[in-house]
Every structure is written in structure tokens, then in C-alpha cells.
Image (cartoon, rainbow, N blue to C red):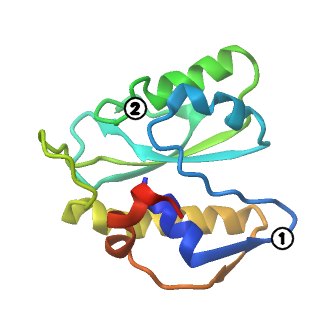
């Protein structure tokens, strides 16, 4: 998701915990070895929520997924929910927090830009991630001020 690239570009993370920001793209189950190598994981992804509106943001523990949440509408071939469940079944899943947004479903045209609702929601998601990292003792320094609209068209190149 573009937000992971925004976090990489705009912030430096220091303190007692190592923070790696990784754009997992649509790798889903290929992320299992990476997920299991960490003590704690924050997943930023698109979610679907029964009755939810485009741009609504959710923040929850994987151990306590609200009943209305599914990952339908995600770009993953194997949904992230199933990937986390497979990892959990093997007993290798670290604690996981999810920051999810209901996306605007695009048609057959592929685009890197975000809908207005999701671009606005990314500000809320950014604050949630940063606040949670600070609660975990991570020191955060802002090093740039790129917007999500500046990052999105270049996300496919990686940062």
C-alpha cells in the first residue's frame, strides 16, 4: 500500500525496537517467512466491512477481528486474512495489529492514484500507525513531508 512508502520516506524510527517498513504488495502467503521473523507486526491493508463506507478506517488486533471485517476487495490472490490464519495455525504468528481501510473498487483500468476518500483516510491511518509505534516506545522523527498523492504514482518503483 502507498502508506507504507509514505512512512518510509517521511519518517525515521529509532529506539529500543527495530522498525522495518515493508511494502508487501500482493505477496500474501509469500510474506509468511517475513512475518514469522518479527516479534510484532502491523499490517496496513484494504479491508471490507459489512455496511462500511469507502474510506472508513479500522484498527484492531488480529486476535480480535471484528465480525464485520473481511479482506474481500483486497488485491491479494490469497487474502491477507488467510495468510495470517495459515501462519497462526503453524504456531508462528507474532502479535499482529491491523490498520485497514475500505477501498474504492476500481474497474478494469489499473491506477496508482487513490480515491479522494482513501487519500483522506490515509491521514488517519498514518496517525494511527505513528501513535501506536510511539505507545510501543519507538521514537519518531519526521524527515520529509511528502503527501500520499505524491507517493502513490511512484509506489510501484519502491522506496
Work out whether 91 lies above or below 5. Answer: above
Residue 58 placement (x, y as % from top left)? 42, 49
Q: Mark 2: give few (<14), some (14-19) or many (20+) Cα within 10 Å.
A: some
Q: Is residue 58 left or right of residue 106?
A: right
Of badges 2 and 1, the one in the foreground is 2
| In the image, farthest residue toward the right | 16
Q: Position of residue 101 (x, y in %)?
A: 36, 50
Q: Is residue 69 left or right of residue 115?
A: right
Left or right of 93 on screen, residue 131:
left
Instruction: Residue lying at the far top in this picture: please name it.
Output: 89
Which quadrant of the figure contains the C terminus?
bottom right
Task: Please provide percent x and percent y for residue 151.
Answer: 39, 70
| Residue 156 falls in image quadrant | bottom left
> Which residue is found at the position 49% from the left and 68% from the top?
6
Q: In percent of the image, x 61 and y 76: which residue is there?
A: 11
Q: Residue at x 82, y 60 (%)?
A: 17
Amino acid at each position: 500500500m502507498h502508506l507504507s512508502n509514505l512512512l518510509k520516506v517521511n519518517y525515521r524510527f529509532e529506539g529500543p525496537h527495530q522498525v522495518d517498513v515493508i511494502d508487501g504488495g500482493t505477496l500474501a502467503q509469500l510474506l509468511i517467512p517475513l512475518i514469522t521473523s518479527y516479534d510484532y507486526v502491523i499490517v496496513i491493508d484494504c479491508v471490507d466491512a459489512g455496511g462500511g463506507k469507502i474510506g472508513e478506517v479500522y484498527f484492531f488486533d488480529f486476535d480480535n477481528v471484528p465480525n464485520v471485517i473481511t479482506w474481500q476487495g483486497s488485491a491479494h490472490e490469497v487474502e491477507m486474512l488467510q495468510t495470517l490464519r495459515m501462519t497462526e495455525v503453524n504456531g508462528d504468528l507474532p502479535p499482529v495489529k491491523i490498520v485497514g481501510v475500505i477501498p474504492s473498487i476500481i474497474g478494469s483500468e489499473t491506477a496508482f492514484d487513490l480515491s479522494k476518500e482513501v487519500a483522506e483516510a490515509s491521514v488517519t491511518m498514518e496517525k494511527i500507525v505513528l501513535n501506536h509505534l510511539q505507545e510501543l516506545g519507538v521514537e519518531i522523527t519526521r524527515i520529509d513531508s511528502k503527501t500520499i498523492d505524491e507517493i502513490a504514482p511512484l509506489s510501484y518503483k519502491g522506496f
